[in-house]
Image (cartoon, helix red, strand yellow):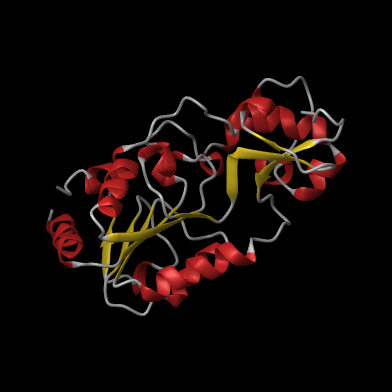
Amino acid sequence: MDEIRRFVDWVETSENIVFFGGAGVSTESGIPDFRSVDGLYNQQYDYPPETILSHSFYMQKPEEFFRFYKNKMLFPDAKPSTTHIKLAQLEKAGKLKGIVTQNIDGLHQKAGSVHVVELHGSVLRNYCERCSKLYGIDAVINSEGIPKCSCGGRIKPDVVLYEEGLSDADLREAVRLIREADMLIVGGTSLGVYPAAGLIDYYSGSKLVLINKTATPYDRRADLLIHEALGKVFSQIN
């Protein structure tokens, strides 16, 4: 395909690449995008995922929150996909300067990527709301009901729930990376969640690549548009 060939050429000739990714990066690792499988949840839960994963729901119905969170958001055995691995290789080669991700699964780091801005946090990090003691993912997975700290406080996942704001430091670093990029690859995201999607506005270069199976609001602004699976595209990079 001509688009993929041009994509590979651009990667080879660029020296400051930034990748901005969403759920589609991890679906190839077997992690479902909960927005695309509503029927699955309606069978087991009385509320839609966006409601359960909100700050107010977490505060009001923590038992139901953690039942959903543990069942549907944690995939500790997931392995990095082709895309994760190729991005890590590009970073190691000095071509990729950073990854800005909306995912919370930690798979970019598992693949070997170092400079990763996790806009929505990570399921691998958890903390006590009372004493701030830090916990890994096992403390949540192995807990009965609501996970509790040794001090008795509730353990909260370090993920950004609906109604919560993004980290100012993460936003600043994401803006810096995107602004300085000579090539911005946007992959596996419908670009419908703000403020994250709006970060693309900071890119002013001439190599904006959008790789997504379905259309996005930014398609017309792309310098290169590829409606293919990410793994198929990234597997062509040497």
Q: Residue at x 34, y 71 (%)?
A: 181
- Residue drawn at x 79%, y 30% is 149
Residue 68, compared with residue 227, is above or below; it is above
233 left or right, relative to 25? left
- Relative placement, left or right, of 172 versus 70 is left
Farthest residue toward the bottom? 204
Q: Is residue 195 visible?
A: no
Q: Measured along the vertical axis of the image, is residue 6 above or below residue 146?
A: below
* Residue at 34% over, 43% down: 84
In the rendered image, residue 228, in percent from the top left (x then y), is placed at 28, 49
Q: Residue 184: where, in percent of width, then height?
A: 33, 66
Nearest the camera: 125 or 49?
Answer: 125
Question: In x, y percent, where is residue 57?
Answer: 80, 43
Judging depth in this view, the residue of 229 and 158 nearest the camera is 158
Residue 153 at least partly seen = yes
Quarter of the image for residue 223 reads: bottom left
Q: Quadrant of residue 10?
A: bottom left
- The image quadrant of residue 109 is top left
Q: Nearer the viewer, residue 97 or 208?
A: 97
**Residue plotted at (36% across, 39% down):** 111
